Structures are given as C-alpha cells and as structure tokens.
C-alpha cells in the first residue's frame, strides 16, 4: 500500500462533451505512477474498451470492474437486471471505498446511472458520508445532480463544441472505445 493522501477530495467530471472517463482513467494512471492503489467501477458499461486493455498491464495498481448489462438505456422504466447491476456496482464502490486498500476510487458513469433511475441520489450521497478522509473519490457521467455538485470539491464540466458524430463518424477503436 502506498503512503496515504493527507486529504482525499471528491471530484466530478460531468457535461455533454467527450472526455469524462478518459480524464478519470488519466488520473488513475497518474495516481498509480505515484504508488497509489486505484479502484475503478464502471456503471452501465459492459465490454472491452481500450482502457481495459491498457490497464491490464497495471493490474497490480489499478483494478477495474464493470457493472452493466450492455443494453441500450432509455428513460423508460429500467430492466430488473440493470437495477441489479447498478446496485451491485454501488455496493462494490462502497466496499472498496471503505476497505483501506485503495487510495483512489473512481465511480465511472455513476451520474448517468442516477439519471436513468438506477441509483437514487441518496444512495450516491451515502458514499460521501462513508468516504475516508484519505481517499480520493472521482465520479463521472453526464447529468450530475446539482446537490452532488454542491458537495464536491472539484467539478469539471466537459462541454461539447463540435463532435465527429455530428458528421456521421462512429466511435473508433482506440479513440472513443
């Protein structure tokens, strides 16, 4: 285990622009480079993304797990398996947050899981209550709730100005996935 952070903060990366997960993964790599142990729990994702391939090479320092079903999400009532996956993810985030094993916890797409009614705001706010002072907590995803933003120490909004999707360019291996 690395030397603990003197003061772990709460960070949120939100907004409609690209780069929230990318920023969080970059922070994970930076932290691991300094000897910190990192846990990444990805909500609503299933499948291999480029970061999984790269982070496998750092498995002693960075653990990454997914809690999704791979289905397309809408604002309609969520499927039972989506709810179960999100709740399992939240339990794993909380367990690892309080375990004393990790210095940085990343709850990737947790804000989107809330937006799609897979997790309540109270469930997410509970993480802030149990977060040890020496652990950095990073939460990502579009539509971060205002109350959560108000409680965070650092909030970055990714703003889309222009995106290749607008020109019909699909997600590319190694760049967007």
Image (tube, rainbow, N blue to C red):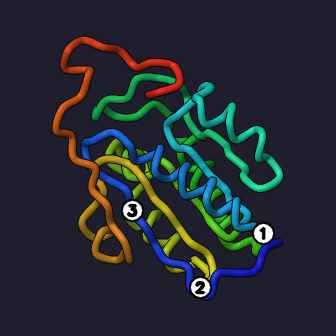
Residue 154 picture location, percent across and down: 36, 72
Query: What secondary structure is marked by label 2?
Result: loop
Mark 2 — residue? 133
Mark 1 — residue? 101
Q: Quadrant of the N terminus?
A: bottom right
Mark 2 neighbour density, 10 Å: few (under 14) some (14–19) many (20 or more): few
From the viewer's perspective, tell me whether residue 88 is left or right of residue 126: right
Mark 3 — residue? 12
From the viewer's perspective, tell me whether residue 64 is left or right of residue 74: right
Residue 43 picture location, percent across and down: 52, 43
How far is disc 3 from disc 2 in space, using C-alphas?
17 Å
Question: Which of disc 3 and disc 1 is earlier in sequence?
Answer: 3
Quadrant of the rendered image containing residue 125: bottom left
Residue lying at 37% horizontally and 56% vertically, measured from the top left: 13
Question: Which of disc 2 and disc 3 is earlier in sequence?
Answer: 3
Quadrant of the rendered image containing residue 6: bottom right
């Amino acid at each position: 285990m690395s030397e603990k952070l003197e003061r772990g903060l709460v960070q949120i990366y939100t907004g409609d622009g690209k780069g929230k997960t990318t920023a969080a993964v970059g922070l994970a790599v930076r932290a691991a480079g300094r000897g910190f142990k990192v846990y990444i729990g990805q909500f609503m994702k299933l499948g291999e993304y480029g970061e999984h391939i790269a982070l496998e090479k750092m498995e002693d320092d960075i653990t990454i797990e997914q809690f999704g079903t791979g289905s397309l999400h809408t604002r309609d009532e969520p499927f039972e398996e989506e709810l179960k996956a999100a709740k399992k993810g939240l339990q794993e985030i909380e367990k690892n947050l309080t375990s004393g094993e990790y210095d940085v916890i990343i709850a990737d797409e947790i804000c989107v899981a809330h937006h799609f009614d897979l997790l309540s705001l109270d469930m997410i706010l509970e993480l802030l209550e149990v977060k040890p002072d020496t652990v950095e907590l990073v939460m990502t995803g579009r539509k971060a709730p205002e109350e959560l933003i108000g409680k965070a120490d650092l909030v970055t909004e990714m703003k889309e100005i222009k995106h290749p999707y607008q020109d019909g360019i699909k997600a590319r291996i190694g760049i967007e996935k």
